[in-house]
Amino acid sequence: MLGDTVVATCLDRVVGGRQLFERQLAAPLPRDPELVLVTDLDGTLLGGPTADRRRFYHWLAEQRQRVLHVFCTGRDLGSIARVLQEDEPIGLAAPHLVIGDVGCTVACGSSLLPLPLAVDPIEARWAGLQERLLPLLQGQPGLTSQPIHSDRRLAYYVDVERFDHSLVPQLEAYGVDCLLSDNRYLDLLPAGVNKGSTLLTLLEWLELDHAKVVTAGDTLNDLAMFETGLNGVMVGNAEAALLAHLPRLPSVYLAAGEGCAGIAEGLRHFGFDHRWD
């Protein structure tokens, strides 16, 4: 069944490509964007002083037909909706597209409705895993379930001092990847699914030039995005565990600025200063 789903998806991608994908969107995408900006939320697009954030959000609004903006976050769709509502007064607008749940969800930015072409293959990978994993996780010290609404991952708050790390290989033997980030979040994802893999699939669907893409993030759940080889920006407030990987990531720039200021600095570094300035 999984093989059939993957084959059908690949055939659709060849035959229909961007046109098929855009039929599932509630709003059109920029036809030929000059920049594809892929941003994590917490600590990145939502990071930095309010004045920097307000200025950056205003720029994004002005550039909406030239810059295709993608949220790439660990948040679920309900949490993303709340952030958009809370930060609307300082200018935060919906992106064109959303990659949520650490890569397990792809949605239209304006409607926040999942896009079946992208989500169904991930759903197929997750089928049956939750029922097998929960008995192993039940009652484990140092784990508290996060109140998320997703059918394609399990998410926990983790106390790394109390958590039994020997449990990780047991869990991964069932066909999941265990991702610890910010020293307090543990996500169990379908094996091979992450922010980076989903982003590459999205770029393939939309037939977008990788040279136009800049990613930005600050925690370990952004590492897979930086490992794609796409241009990336680690913002100045990135966690130490992510910074440790920087020497092996030649396409990633470490910004001095935090949050939005760091993203803007990275855009200048990668030659998009004509858009930002």
Image (spheres, grey):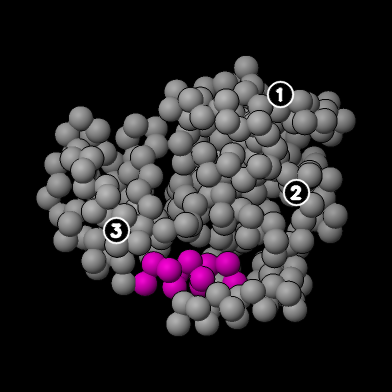
Q: Which mark is residue 265?
A: 1
In magenta stretch: residue 4: no
For label 1, the SS is helix
- The boundaries of the magenta stretch are 117-127
Q: Which mark is residue 213?
A: none
Instruction: Give the amino acid type for the residue marked by disc 3 in the picture.
Output: Ala
Residue 189 locus on image (x, y percent):
39, 55
For label 3, the SS is loop
Q: Is 135 on the left-hand or right-hand side of 70?
A: left
Please identify the dominant SS of the magenta region: helix
Q: Which mark is residue 173?
A: 3
* Residue highlighted by disc 2: 210
Q: Is 169 on the left-hand or right-hand side of 242?
A: left
Q: Which part of the image, by quadrant, shows the C terminus?
A: top right
Alpha carbon separation for disc pair 3 and 2:
33 Å
Mark 3 residue crowding within 10 angstroms, few (<14) / some (14–19) / many (20+): few
Give the camera-side residue of 164 and 152: 164
In the displayed structure, would residue 223 be above or below residue 68?
above
Residue at 47% across, 57% down: 192
Res. 9 in view: yes
| Res 26 → quadrant | bottom right
Residue 68 locus on image (x, y percent):
74, 49
Mark 1 residue crowding within 10 angstroms, few (<14) / some (14–19) / many (20+): many
Alpha carbon separation for disc pair 1 and 2:
20 Å
